[in-house]
Image (cartoon, helix red, strand yellow):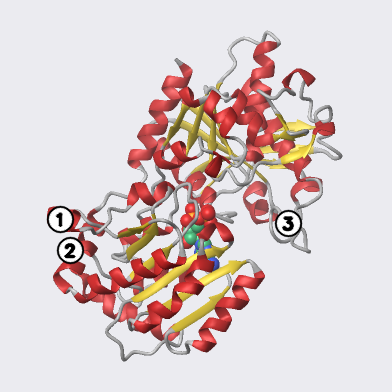
Amino acid sequence: MKVLFVASECAPFVKTGGLADVIGAVPKTLAGMGVSVRVMLPAYPALAEIAASGEAVLELDDLHGGPARLIAASAAGLDLLLLDAPHLFDRPGNIYLDMDGIDWADNALRFGALAQVGARVALEGAGGWRPDVVNAHDWQAGLIPAYLHQAREGGAADVPASVMTIHNIAFQGLVDAGLMGALNLSPALYTSEGAEYYGHLGMLKAGVAFADRITTVSPTYAREILTPEFGMGLEGILGARRGVLSGILNGIDTEVWDPAADAALAAPYSAADPGGKAANRAALAKRFDLRADTDGPLFCVVSRLTGQKGLDLLLDALPALVARGGRLALLGSGDRDMEAAFVGAAHRHAGSVGVIVGYDETLSHMMQGGADAILIPSRFEPCGLTQLYGLRYGTVPVVARTGGLADTVIDANDAALEAGCATGVQFAPVTAPALAQAIERTCDLYADRPAWEAIVANGMAHPVGWDRAAREYLTLYEDACA
Ligand code: ADP
């Protein structure tokens, strides 16, 4: 089996969110299972050195305004195909946004080009390698299933199967339909059952409409996106294609995220030997200027600060957290108003609430290592990774009952406690009072040491690696090819 992954980000090279973790991990795990995988990415500046070490397998005279090459290279255990098109991708700063924080005006062409070249590799091969299946990820690769459909309609034989994976349906790549011609898309695709979305070209919608299989990153989210509340306008086309839609839960890299061997921690620890947690808790409290004289749990948040993540609700629930002797260490960045609101809350609750605005991978490890619980009050969450890190680090996830959060955390209700399977706290509806109640319930559980220790131990024993997901992807690819 040969599989081409096409995506706009990939850990450890370029990452703005969970998508990158999946692209960095699943191909590696599949390769370990004997699958031949290539990961195609834009050659951003962060990948320039790796690109320089590779070899060109395709040359294009003109790709939307400049020459381009596809470079085969290997790094971080991955076989990469890097689309080197400096006029599109050699830009400073964020991969999606210009210096003013606004989407690059030519994002449609930048990622349309990625999809075009991805489809070309699928149809013609590159460097003597051609995939059986293309797995397109999110809107940036969404046009690939459309190109492959177009090739089939045009009579091409032996067209690879396509899988469209939705990591976050909030980002849909809605662009000017006038670009269809420039992107070499047939007008025949521009229908309400196809690539058209209320007068625009919908890049994710095109993928959903034309892929042989559609996946998203948890079974609950796969059901949720069929509803108007979560489908963000795509519930109709998804409903029409529900027969090929499924959810495959993400995993995490259990080598990168291993409390027994994490260089970011003050002290290593494990389920068998959890004593090191105390030293990590103390280090974390110090880093966030939090008081030491309390018996309550130390909560953490590691998150983008956006409406999706529901952290505005946490602002409202903070008094309950503080009143119960809890402490909060928050690391996040995003919405400027929310950043300012949390900084203000840290001033108001000095010693109980500490806030660091920014993106800091090393600190995020320290937080998972040092906190007792991690708060994730998301309004929607396709899968979520931080609750999985939390389970692995014995940092009890307190989560909204939605998407992948609902699928990965077992609520510590009486029945689950009695059965000995609880791994965290879930709450619904996703409101400030329900979150405050969940925080109070967490404080109660924390005070009951045997119960708390059992929840921590259950979480640490929960399998969170990529093996299961990779096996499910492989079965799906085999099914799509058949
Ligand atoms: P999303 O992709 O919607 O942001 P996920 O939970 O799927 O949410 O993935 C978020 C990833 O980004 C996790 O690996 C998390 O640790 C990381 N992350 C988010 N914010 C920060 C931050 N401020 N500093 C460091 N890592 C962060």
Q: Kindly identify which numbered label has been placed on residue 251.
A: none
| Res 118 seen here | no
Between 200 and 250, the one nearer to me in the picture: 200
The answer to whether residue 324 is above or below residue 469 is below
Q: What amino acid is found at the position of numbered circle 2 in the picture?
A: Ala
Q: Secondary structure at mark 2?
A: helix
Locate the C terminus and report the quarter of the image it occupies.
Answer: top left
Q: Is residue 284 left or right of residue 104?
A: left
Between 103 and 66, the one nearer to me in the picture: 103
Q: Which residue is mark 2?
A: 454
| Res 213 seen here | yes
Q: What amino acid is found at the position of numbered circle 1 in the picture?
A: Gly
- Which mark's residue is nearer the viewer, 2 or 3? 2
- Which mark's residue is nearer the viewer, 1 or 3? 1
Q: Is residue 52 left or right of residue 396?
A: right
Q: Is residue 252 left or right of residue 65?
A: left
Q: Secondary structure at mark 3?
A: loop
Are circles 2 and 1 on residues that touch, CB within 8 Å? yes
Residue 340 percent coordinates (x, y):
62, 77
Residue 259 percent coordinates (x, y):
31, 65
Q: Residue at x 31, y 77 (%)?
A: 297
Are circles 2 and 3 on residues that touch, CB within 8 Å? no
> Which circle's residue, 1 or 3, is located before the other in the chain?
3
Q: Which residue is mark 3?
A: 97
